[in-house]
Amino acid sequence: MRASRPSFASACCSVLLLAGCPEPHDAQRDASSSPAAATVQTPPAESARPAPGLPTDPDPYLHARPVSAKSIGHTSYVLKLTLEGGAVAAFKPRSKLPLGDHRYRGEIAAYRLARALGLENVPRAIPRSFAADDLRALRRDFDEKGLVDDDGRVRGALIPWIERYRVLPLEEPRERARWEPWLFDAHAVIPDDERGLAATISTMIAFDYVTANWDRWSGGNVAEDEATGKVLFVDNDGAFYEWPAQATLARQRAQLEHVTRFSRRFVEALRALDLDRLRAALGEETPGVPLVPERAVVGVDTRRSTLLDIIDARIADAGASVTLSFD
């Protein structure tokens, strides 16, 4: 989902890529704490509706109604919403566009998994629904693209807007020539002021393999929040598909097998994330309804194990101090 200006929305998690389907491109550019060894963080559940009788949550992203809407998506349906009280967010709803019935879930799932692994790089993405009539009143073209549930509401991922959002063109040849040696050559010297970026790219490559996100390197899917300096893994709706494209997974695995340096804390968190903890981290979209299909959850866990096998082989060959050279 391309934004109309270099701002962005913070977001998270969904899961699904059907074998044989074209790999659509999407871009509105959407950032948690480090786990102790053998400890996985389970992110707190975020609900769009308060329980009856409880005080209303003051977080406007969970409950405020929209007062304006602007379409900013290209290959997916994305709305820039202003909410009552002035909060601004990107909303990626269920839509009639290709894979639009579930792409938003990848944003939410990526955020939840990142939180569980102690990563701050995936922007906040909240499961949220709005009354379809509220969106129709703001967008005359809503019914052309929006997919409405039987209860008259529209589910999706709400991503708080990031004002100082800047795309990092890491996929461009000149940028690749700069950072690839840091990761692919164990003898390369990483400048001290670039070690943070090198570690983040290493973790991003690994995270995208685990989530089966095919869309990272299609342009504009890495960004920086200039207010914090945080590198952001954005547009995660190409992840967590029930049937990931095997050719994409093969390319990702081949790239991983060339990575020589990983984050020690990230690897520790991966080791602690068993299947039960993974299910708990991904959680539900609504009460009783898992966010991610079980087949996709098992796929994430299988790729997690494969990634650890790759890392352990690297450790056996080069040593832990070289392989786990990032904090």
Image: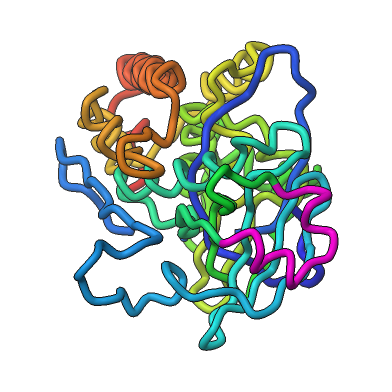
Quarter of the image for residue 280 reads: top left
Q: Is residue 269 above or below residue 168?
A: above
Q: Image point 36% across, 62% down: which residue?
A: 49
Q: Image point 69% across, 72% down: which residue?
A: 7
* Residue 149 image point, x, y percent: 58, 44
* Residue 188 image point, x, y percent: 54, 39
User: How many numbered marks are there?
Assistant: 0
Quarter of the image for residue 88 reads: bottom right
Judging from the image, the colouring scheme is rainbow
Q: Can residue 38 be seen?
A: yes
* Residue 175 image point, x, y percent: 73, 49
Q: Is residue 323 left or right of residue 55?
A: right
Residue occupying the far front of the picture: 151
Q: Can residue 195 be seen?
A: no
In this view, the residue in front, 269 or 62, is 62
Q: Image point 38% across, 46% down: which residue?
A: 112
Q: Is residue 66 above or below residue 171?
A: below
Asked if the magenta segment contains residue 124, the reply would be no
* Extent of the magenta region: 131-146
Q: Is residue 8 left or right of residue 32?
A: right
